[in-house]
Every structure is written in structure tokens, then in C-alpha cells.
Image (cartoon, rainbow, N blue to C red):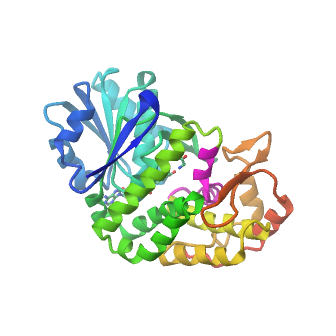
Amino acid sequence: MKTQDVELGERSYPIYAGKALLTDPSLYARHLSGRNVLVVTDSNVAPLYLQALIESLGNHNVSQVVLQAGEEFKTLDAVSTVYDELMAQKFDRSSTIIALGGGVTGDIAGFAAASFQRGIQFLQVPTTLLAQVDSSVGGKTGVNHPRGKNMIGAFHQPTAVIADIDTLQTLPAREYSAGLAEVTKYGLINQPAFFDWLSDNLESLLQLDPDTVAEAVLSCCRFKAEIVAADERESGQRALLNLGHTFGHAIENAVGYGVWLHGEAVAAGICLAARFSALSGFMPHAQVTTIEKLLHRANLPIHPPAEMTAAQFLELMSRDKKVRDQVLTLVLMRGIGKAFLTSSYDREALHQMLAEQPAKAAT
Ligand code: NAD
Ligand code: GLY
């Protein structure tokens, strides 16, 4: 097991990553203060890991909520289901929620923890690659609105993240690839050496070689922890973590939540950000090809859905959380590992690029 701390003063917490952690009672004992524990999971993860986790909690008073799996169920109704169980069990402010599952479960359970009685503790036990490298770390919680991704939420840090890489063995290959989009993102933001490492080790990662997976998870958590520690509430540089997401969220919303996986939409979004960076003269065109090749090798789409129009993109992107006074800030790149934020770009050129996307959607 390896540990990476997220340094946030009194809200600091450890990320544990390694094998056989889900059933390690000492990790839960270390981070559960009150007696009451609500485990929130989803309908795919429950049959695989819920019982084993509960058996590792010792003699706590444990309750459970099993949510319907899927991005389309990342709604306020799901959060309400969690509140209902907390109320039914008369759980109080000393209670802890454990989020067992992917990013959807973590975001819902985290938001319930942020808002129930104005905030109770929660632990993240991520079981997808995407959640282990990204969503379980950093304290963003929330749900979707029919008109926009992650529009309702709160910052609420977990008390620990327990990332058991053994759980990735049961993850469907498509979901695993989706996680690789967020892994690639870190290389592109500010870790060019990691991008090269990823390119060299992608086959081992796709084969779930445990040492390679552990190294990838730990590295990504370290990169994210550094950014979050510097800008917890996204007043500046944390927005770099949204590379590819403004385009990606528009795709997820346009095709219907759950049709494209979040990571797939981010992959196509990263390619759009790269192409626009090159078109704007910020980045060499050859690097766009390098990025596309890597994402394609990871079995990810590199073009948006063929049916999406430029008007649809721009309308959905105008609701992005990086819009201020109707001006959208984009995350672009000056090269691999050199992402930056800008609101000075040619809007007409963006419109034209989105209108001219080739109809080559891979999903
Ligand atoms: P997910 O939670 O929907 O999980 C993907 C699928 O895999 C689900 O069907 C789930 O039931 C199943 N699953 C989970 N673990 C499994 C396992 N070990 N074995 C078999 N099946 C398993 O999706 P995700 O990709 O983990 O997360 C995507 C979500 O995360 C999106 O809603 C996105 O907006 C959010 N997100 C949040 C942050 C953040 O900072 N809070 C960051 C990135 C993404
Ligand atoms: N995934 C974006 C963030 O955590 O800030």
C-alpha cells in the first residue's frame, strides 16, 4: 500500500492506493469516528463488494443504500434516497457515509454528506479507474441538472480515500478505457514526462498489470493533490483539471447522460481542445496527432458525435461553470504538458472548427 496526502490544513486527508485495501479493517477503524455508518453504492457494485466492505467495518451500526447504476441516475432524486435512509435510521452528525463505487456514486454520496445536517463525514472507496485517479480526490461533489452536467453541488472533502486496485479486475473494459482519458489529462496539463511514461506503458495498463496500474493511480493522485492543495475551490489553476471537459460535458448532455461515458466525452473533448489550440497557433499540429494516437490506442473516441452541431455545442458550452459575465474561459494547450486558461480566443474560429468536425465518431 502507498499513501499520498492531500494537504488542506485541517481538511487534509490521505489517499491509500494498493491491493486488498477494501477488506482491510484497520483503514476503516482509523477513519470512522462515530458508530453510525451508511454505505452508499450502486446496483452493479453492490453484488461484487458491498458485503466484503461491510464485514470489514467491525461493530459499527451499518446501514446501506443501493442506487441505480448509471450517469442518468446522478440526480437530486438519488441524493434524496440517501437522505431518506439517514433519516429512517435517525443518523446524526457523528455519522459517516462511505461511497463505494465509481464517480457517480462518489459524487452523489459526497453531496449527501455535504448537505445532510449541514455536513457529515464521508469516506471514498473508489472502484473505477476514473474514480481512483480523479473523482474521489479533491472534494467536488454533486449531481446533474437536465440542462447541465454537475450543476448542483458542493465542495466537501472526504476524510480518506481507499483505492483498492484489485477492484479494477471486474470493471468492464469500456469503463476502464474511460478512466484512461482522465489519466491522459494529467500528462497534458503539466506532466509531459508522465505523458511519455503513459505512452510507453499503455499496453501494460490495458492488461491491468498491477504494478503499472498502481503507479498510474498514485501518480495521478499526486498530480491532482498538488493542484487541489494550491486551489481547493477553483479560484484559478484548479480549472486546468477541466481540460477537455467543457466540450465533453456538452457531448454528455447532448447525446443524453449515460450514452457516452464521461471519460469518452472527455477524450473527444481533449482532442477538440488540442485541435483548437493548434488552429489558434498555440500548439504544433504534430502534437495533436500524438494526443489522438494515444487516446485511440486506449480505445477512446477522438471525435465528437457526428450528429452534434456547432450551435448545439456553443449553446451547451455557454452554461459551463467557467462562464463569467457570458464569457467562457477555455482550457487550451501550448503543447503537451502546457495547459493554460484563456478567454482570449477567436470565437468565430471556434464555431467554424466545431461546424467542420469530421463525422467519425467512434462510439
Ligand atoms: P460510474 O460511477 O458510473 O461507474 C462506471 C460503471 O462501472 C457503473 O456502471 C458502475 O456500476 C460500474 N462499476 C463501478 N465499479 C465497478 C467494478 N469495480 N466492477 C464492475 N463494475 C463497476 O462512472 P465513473 O466513470 O466512475 O465516474 C464518472 C462520473 O464521475 C461522472 O459523473 C463525472 O462527472 C464524475 N466525475 C467527478 C469528478 C469530481 O471531481 N467529483 C471528477 C471526474 C469525474
Ligand atoms: N475533475 C475536476 C476537478 O476535480 O477539479
Residue 19 left/right relative to 68: left
**Residue closer to the observer: 326 or 46:** 326
Q: Position of residue 271 (x, y in %)?
A: 63, 69
Where is residue 44 drawn, in percent x and y?
Answer: 31, 56
> Quick check: 356 above or below 253?
below
Q: How many marks?
A: 0
Determine the residue located farthest toward the front in the rendered image: 193
Q: Could you say which is closer to the camera, residue 325 or residue 38?
A: 325
Does 255 lie within the magenta span? yes
**Residue at left offset 34%, top offset 67%:** 212
Q: Is residue 303 magenta?
A: no
Question: Which secondary structure type mostly characterizes the magenta part of the structure?
Answer: helix
User: Is the residue 75 above or below the residue 256 in the image?
Assistant: above
The residue positioned 77% from the left and 74% from the top of the image is 356
120 relative to 22 in the view: left or right: right
Please provide percent x and percent y for residue 2: 29, 51
Residue 140 locus on image (x, y percent) = 50, 41
* Residue 44 visible within the image: yes
Q: Quarter of the image containing the C terminus?
A: bottom right
Q: Nearer the viewer, residue 15 or 275?
A: 15
Residue 259 visible here? no
Relative height, residue 242 to residue 197 (above, below): above
Q: What span is colored magenta in the figure?
A: 237-259
Q: Is residue 14 left or right of residue 254?
A: left
**Based on the displayed image, in which of its 4 quarters is residue 336 positioned?**
bottom right
Residue depicted at 49% across the width and 49% down the height:
224
**Rendering quadrant holding ligand 1:** bottom left
